[in-house]
Amino acid sequence: INACLPCAAGEMSAQLTEGSFALAWHVTPPALRATSPALQERLSNMRRHPPRIAAMRDTKAPTAPHRARKRFGQNFLVDRHYILRIVDAIDPRPEQRIVEIGPGQAALTRELLAAMDAHCATGQAASLDVVEIDRDLVARLTAEFPRDRLRVHEADALEFDFATLAADAKLRVVGNLPYNISTPILFRLCEFEDRISDMTFMLQKEVVDRMAASEGSGERGRLSVMLQYRYRVEKCFDVPPGAFRPIPAVDSSIVRLTPLGSKRLRPNNETRFAQIVTAAFTQRRKMIRKSLAAWVSADAWTAIGIEPTARAEDLSTAEFVAISDWREGSSP
Ligand code: SAM
């Protein structure tokens, strides 16, 4: 509000914000309190009938508490211990190009910026890019952070062109991902593999366990193979449901993905490779000679060097590449 505070020197206009109301009262010099009955009355009225917060803030800034939207997978991190552990695992530096997916109410964003600032030369401030779909949250973010600190992209991360942010440097992608679309986001980001230096995400624990599962594990699936042939997948630590509001029904984990770059296996035909991996795990309980019968003839398994009685979860990424390359070489 614009509070016109009459004082001995004339009219003093002050912008009172939520926090500065208390400050204004406490810093009012005793002489002013004593000599300005009008001011005293106004402040005491404000105490008795505190103005609604909505009226005290910048009119552009949203004021009511944000109501979490289920459709956007909004479970906000509130436990500072875990927020700091995540930032520590990311170890952000000011010279890096960092983009956060789904900043929400900026729980991670704020600490990421603070951690980057701590490494800045004196007087400099770091900056971040964020991609957020919820326009209410976008309004809050743009009201809280100046544009030279936070470049807010109001967009669906499933459609956002991350290459536009990686013109001059590879990206570090981070975020507490909306669980309802985490797998599609991971596959979408595979399209930018060459532009990314690493990714650190919070995901549903069960998904992280599948992402990191090695051959022979019952948790191994299409997601494990399709990610592990591109990235080193490291599970960092678990985060309990109580660290979020609203409290989710599932446990969460932090995972880091680092592109393998030139070390990664390159199937001769990536589309064929993906089709074979999908086919094998669609019938995961069957032996591969059955689940992949449409792709590999029964007499070819010896030539490929793979036991036909194995199940999909027993195969390494290299073995899936061998099957795909054999098929590529044998198809007309
Ligand atoms: N980073 C915040 C935190 O840790 O408290 C919020 C995390 S919340 C689990 C997921 C965030 O992703 C929400 O802010 C949600 O609005 C946003 N989001 C959901 N779907 C999205 C999409 N398709 N593209 C971009 N952001 C999305």
Image (cartoon, rainbow, N blue to C red):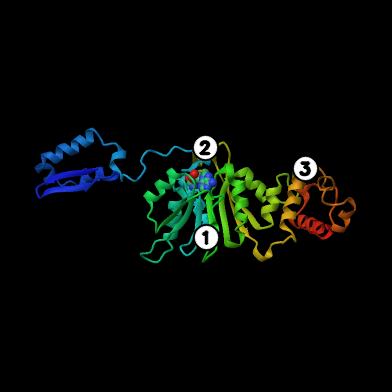
Q: Secondary structure at mark 3?
A: loop
Residue furthest to the right in view is 299
Of mark 2 and mark 3, the one earlier in the sequence is 2
- 255 horizontally vs 46: left or right: right
Mark 2 or 1, nearer chain start: 2
Q: Residue sitting at 18 percent across and 48 percent down?
A: 13
Residue bearing the label numbered 2: 70
Instruction: Provide residue 208's location: percent of width, then percent of height.
Output: 63, 47
Q: Residues within 10 Å of mark 1 (few under 14, many from 20)?
A: few
Q: Callout 2: 10 Å neighbours few (<14), some, many (20+)?
A: few
Point out the tag, 1 or 3, that comes first from the N-terminus: 1
Q: Viewed as shown, does residue 170 lie left or right of 123?
A: right
Residue 112: x percent and y percent? 46, 55
Disc 1: which residue:
164
Q: Secondary structure at mark 2?
A: helix
Q: Quadrant of residue 126?
A: bottom left
**Which of the image's four quarters has the C terminus?**
bottom right
Check disc 1 and report its element: helix, strand or loop.
helix
Foreground residue among 169 and 91: 169
Q: Residue furthest top?
A: 48
Query: Is the residue indicated by label 1 positioned so its CB lies within 8 Å of ligand 1?
Result: no
Q: Residue at x 57, y 56 (%)?
A: 199
Q: Which of the two discs, 1 and 3, sits closer to the camera?
A: 1
**Gap in Å between the C-alphas at discs 2 and 1?**
29 Å
- Mark 1 near mark 3, Cβ–Cβ under 8 Å? no
Q: Name the amino acid, label 3.
A: Gln
Q: Amino acid at mark 2?
A: Lys
Residue 283 numbered tag: 3
- Give the quarter of the image for residue 44: top left
